[in-house]
């Protein structure tokens, strides 16, 4: 990737209390903290919903990947409403349909299948980052 470009913003679902929402967040943490920390920056959906100026500024000036937990696609909608550009949106449900053996259960703590689903999802998004032309940066910040 080109080290001179901005990081891709990752905005996961906030589906608190729902296994697919938890998978979304765990996948985002895996992507931003382990797989592609130099290429991504996590922005919490709640910050966009609450109108956090720094989060809105970050989203408005970066390409975004959204990871949604259900058909409502709240993360994608909020990025667009915040003036951001969604370069890639992915649904946990779509990934689950391709990996039905990985049925997530649990909310505060995902079962092993849910954790594996989150890792599969994170790896899939990591593979898409090259297509988005996500750049590495030297700022060192991985979360907004």
Image: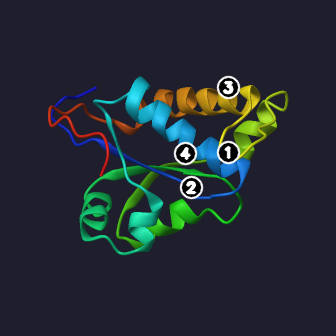
Labels 1 & 2 near each other (Cβ < 8 A): yes
Q: Are marks 4 and 2 in contact (CB under 8 Å)?
A: yes
Q: Secondary structure at mark 1?
A: helix
Q: Is residue 143 left or right of residue 95?
A: left
Kindly state the secondary structure of the residue where label 2 is placed. loop
User: Gap in Å between the C-alphas at discs 1 and 4?
Assistant: 10 Å
Of the pair 65 and 27, the residue shown nearer to us: 27
| For residue 114, above or below residue 57 | above
- In the rendered structure, which disc, 1 or 2, sits on the residue that comes first in sequence? 2
Q: CA distance from mark 3 to mark 1?
A: 12 Å
Please name the residue that numbered disc 3 is placed on.
116
Indicate whether 124 appears above or below 20.
above
Q: CA distance from mark 3 to mark 4?
A: 13 Å
Q: Which mark is residue 13?
A: 2
What residue sits right under mark 1 in the picture? 92
Spot occupied by residue 121 in the image (x, y as percentages of width and height): 61, 33
**Disc 4 to disc 2, how far (Cα)?**
7 Å
Q: Is residue 62 left or right of residue 34?
A: left
């Amino acid at each position: 990737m080109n080290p001179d470009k901005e990081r891709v913003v990752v905005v996961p679902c906030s589906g608190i209390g729902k296994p697919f929402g938890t998978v979304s967040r765990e996948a985002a943490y895996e992507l931003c903290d382990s797989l592609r920390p130099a290429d991504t920056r996590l922005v919490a959906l709640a910050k966009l919903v609450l109108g956090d100026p720094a989060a809105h500024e970050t989203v408005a000036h970066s390409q975004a990947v959204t990871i949604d937990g259900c058909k409502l696609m709240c993360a994608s909608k909020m990025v667009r409403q915040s003036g951001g550009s969604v370069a890639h949106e992915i649904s946990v449900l779509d990934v689950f349909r391709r990996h039905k053996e990985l049925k997530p259960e649990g909310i505060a703590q995902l079962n092993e299948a849910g954790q594996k689903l989150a890792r599969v999802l994170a790896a899939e998004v990591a593979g898409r980052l090259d297509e988005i032309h996500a750049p590495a940066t030297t700022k060192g910040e991985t979360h907004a």
